[in-house]
Image (cartoon, rainbow, N blue to C red):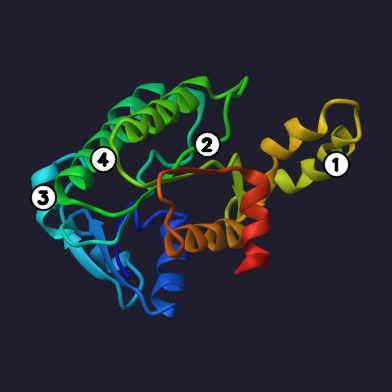
């Protein structure tokens, strides 16, 4: 498959792209000036700006899938304005590019929702989902809550308490939806989604993210 990735030098992109290349896919990634050297070996770099459609629209034509991973690093409530200026704005541009260029499948990194915390972040991702639902594209929306991996291991200390909370009446479904997933599980679920495009809109929640790792 011909795959275009935004946010490729981030936490998930650096894990996803080598897996796609190992599966024999042709991967092109959007990179800012000076960041192309951080892309995995074998990935084609396109220097451009995710907020500027004309810097990558031509390159997206003919792609089987656009994977949109762009977002503010280490999100927290203090970054509400950045979520609008980066996360939402980049999603709006990427969706418009995908529609204009005839992309067959759009994969969007969203977040588990509704949620009682990180409301600005969740709201921006919800708006991204709504734009995709109105786009007419075949779409996969992936909704993790927190992805564990290198540099992101502190939540492991919470896992025993998290498991106990699941035993409380009425809490199991909630804790499943907001459960932690590993970088390996997240990568496997993205590859699974890319290689099996839907006909319409597909939403992958935390339980499905975990299961897809075993499905291959």
x, y (%) of residue 98? 22, 47
The residue carrying mark 4 is 95
The residue carrying mark 1 is 163
Q: Earlier in the sequence, mark 1 or mark 2?
A: 2
Q: In front here: 175 or 204?
A: 204
SS assignment at label 1:
helix
Q: Quadrant of the C terminus?
A: bottom right
Q: In front here: 72 or 154?
A: 72
| Mark 2 crowdedness (10 Å alpha carbons): few <14, some 14-19, many ≥20 | many
The answer for how far apart the CA atoms under marks 1 and 2 are is: 21 Å
The answer for how far apart the CA atoms under marks 3 and 1 are is: 47 Å
Q: Nearer the viewer, mark 3 or mark 4?
A: 4
Answer with the quarter of the image where residue 8 lies. Answer: bottom left
x, y (%) of residue 55? 10, 50
x, y (%) of residue 161? 85, 37
Answer with the quarter of the image where residue 52 lies. Answer: top left
Q: Earlier in the sequence, mark 3 or mark 2?
A: 3
The answer for how far apart the CA atoms under marks 3 and 2 are is: 27 Å
The residue carrying mark 3 is 55
Residue drawn at 17 percent across, 47 percent down: 49
The answer for how far apart the CA atoms under marks 3 and 4 are is: 14 Å
The residue carrying mark 2 is 111
SS assignment at label 3:
helix
Horizontally, residue 198 falls left or right of residue 53, namely right
Horizontally, residue 21 falls left or right of residue 97, namely right
Q: Is residue 72 above or below residue 26?
A: above
Q: Earlier in the sequence, mark 3 or mark 4?
A: 3
SS assignment at label 4:
helix
| Mark 1 crowdedness (10 Å alpha carbons): few <14, some 14-19, many ≥20 | few
């Amino acid at each position: 498959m011909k795959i275009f990735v935004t946010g490729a030098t981030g936490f998930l992109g650096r894990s996803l792209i080598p897996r796609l290349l190992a599966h024999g896919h042709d991967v092109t990634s959007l990179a800012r000036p000076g960041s192309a050297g951080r892309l995995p070996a074998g990935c084609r770099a396109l220097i451009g700006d995710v907020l500027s459609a004309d810097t990558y629209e031509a390159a997206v034509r003919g792609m089987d899938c656009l994977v949109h991973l762009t977002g503010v690093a280490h999100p927290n409530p203090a970054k509400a304005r950045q979520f609008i200026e980066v996360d939402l704005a980049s999603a709006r541009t990427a969706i418009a590019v995908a529609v204009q260029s005839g992309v067959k499948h759009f994969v969007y990194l969203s977040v588990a929702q509704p949620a009682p915390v990180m409301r600005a972040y969740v709201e921006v991702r919800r708006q991204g989902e709504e734009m995709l639902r109105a786009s007419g594209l075949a779409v996969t929306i992936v909704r993790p809550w927190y992805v564990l991996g290198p540099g992101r291991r502190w939540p492991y200390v919470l896992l025993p308490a998290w498991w106990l909370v699941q035993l409380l009446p009425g809490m199991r479904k909630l804790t499943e939806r907001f459960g932690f997933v590993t970088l390996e599980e997240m990568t496997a679920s993205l590859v699974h989604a890319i290689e099996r495009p839907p006909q319409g809109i597909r939403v992958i929640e935390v339980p499905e993210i975990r299961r897809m790792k075993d499905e291959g």
